[in-house]
Amino acid sequence: MSGTGEGSWRDTILAGLANYIDAGSIVAGSVALALWRESFGLSDRFVGLIGAFSANAISAGVGALIGGVLCDRFGRKKIYQYDMLFYAFGMLWLVFASTPWMIVLGFVMVGLAVGADIPASWSLIAEQAPDTKRGAHSGVAQMLWYLGPVIVLGAAYFLKPFGMSGIRWLFVHLLVLAVALTFLRSRMHESRRWEESRAASRGSRPLLVWRELFRAPYIGSILFLAGMYGFWNLWAGYNGFFTPYLIERNHLPAWAATVVPAGYFLIGMISILGLFMTLSDKVDQRLLFGTSAVLHVVGMALLAIFGFRLEVVILHIVIMGVAGGFGAQSFFQLWSAELFPTAVRSTAQGLTFAIVRIGLGLWSLAVPSLAANDFTLLAWILTGFLVASGVIGLAWAPRNQGKSLEQLEAERAGR
């Protein structure tokens, strides 16, 4: 059973736009961070607080945990349709932010919304994709995740000269898109696999209650995904939310704060299209992941060894952009759908995503102060995180290419 035709790709794009607004809100916040710091006299500790509770971290994790449970109980469509209105309301607080508490409140609401949308959209994408193109469909969502920062950072290059009045338009465009997405998604169909799973469990004990996620084999899958993606995401959170901020704090050219990070995401899009979407359904996924992991470690070690200088940052961005396209995040979306049955797929994704993002939130509290006082130490710590992610991924990466979700479920159950 699988989706086919243009409708399948259309639904993948509409569901995957959650990734666009997730990444877009993170990077829009990162661009605004230096301006907010100057306008409101924010301390490094408060900057860390914004990062910790932003759409990048804790609030997104909590939203994913709640949204995942609701998604398996009431369906994917209800969650991924209406949470965009909540997102839009949160964006209003960022558009009109005039005090620091409005920034925190806006990011908390935005984070809850995008967090709830992630397990809904990722589950839908996997469940409606053709069995032989599940990686390619997941790659579309990742392309949209990278597209958000490219557009936001590109626009920020022209808007930053106008100060906070210009940057507010970054949040406005995300608000408008969220409202439009609510209407566009209203025509989408519910996941057929979810409907069949619900029908099969009616009148009897549910096929799988969420508590069973804490038993074998599912607890092992959760620990694998949380470790592989979690350690990588500690680097990614620094990269996505704090890179423009650090570029300005280290007095690099003004254009670098937007152009350099945008270059990372643009290179990543090319890598997703040319490598992940092309190869992930055909070749050994462990080999792809391992190659990406090695490149990540090399790229981050460059900053640790040679420092936060413009030429080093540019080389770092090129290497990390290529590696990121077929690395931990792309495989996390794919594997987190494949390693769990339909009845609890979104719950499992939401739980794992929550562990990762809440961990990132706690780490984000320390990043600004550590970067200001000892960037070399921060760079080596991040390099260590990437080594840990690579080792975990290489040790336990599954080989699921070409198999249906039902076949994978039967294999886990020993049937």
Image: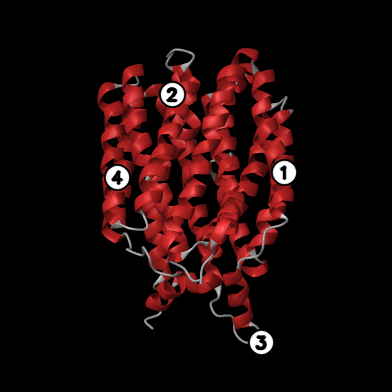
Q: How many angstroms separate mark 3 from mark 1 (CA)?
A: 38 Å
Residue at disc 1, secondary structure: helix
Residue at coordinates 33% horizontally, 63% vertically from top-left? 398
Q: Which residue is mark 2?
A: 260
Q: Is the residue marked by circle 3 packed among few (<14), some (14-19), or many (20+) residues within 10 Å? A: few
Whether 65 is drawn above or below 215: the answer is above
Callout 3 amino acid = Gly
Q: Which residue is mark 4?
A: 293
Residue at disc 4, secondary structure: helix
Callout 4 amino acid = Ala
Name the spot of residue 380 as percent of width and height, x first: 30, 33
Q: Which residue is mark 3?
A: 203
Residue at coordinates 26% horizontally, 53% vertically from top-left? 287
Q: Is the residue marked by circle 2 packed among few (<14), some (14-19), or many (20+) residues within 10 Å? A: many
Question: Of the residues under marks 2 and 1, which one precedes in the sequence?
Answer: 1
**Label 4–label 1 contact, CB within 8 A:** no
Name the spot of residue 59 as percent of width and height, x first: 60, 46
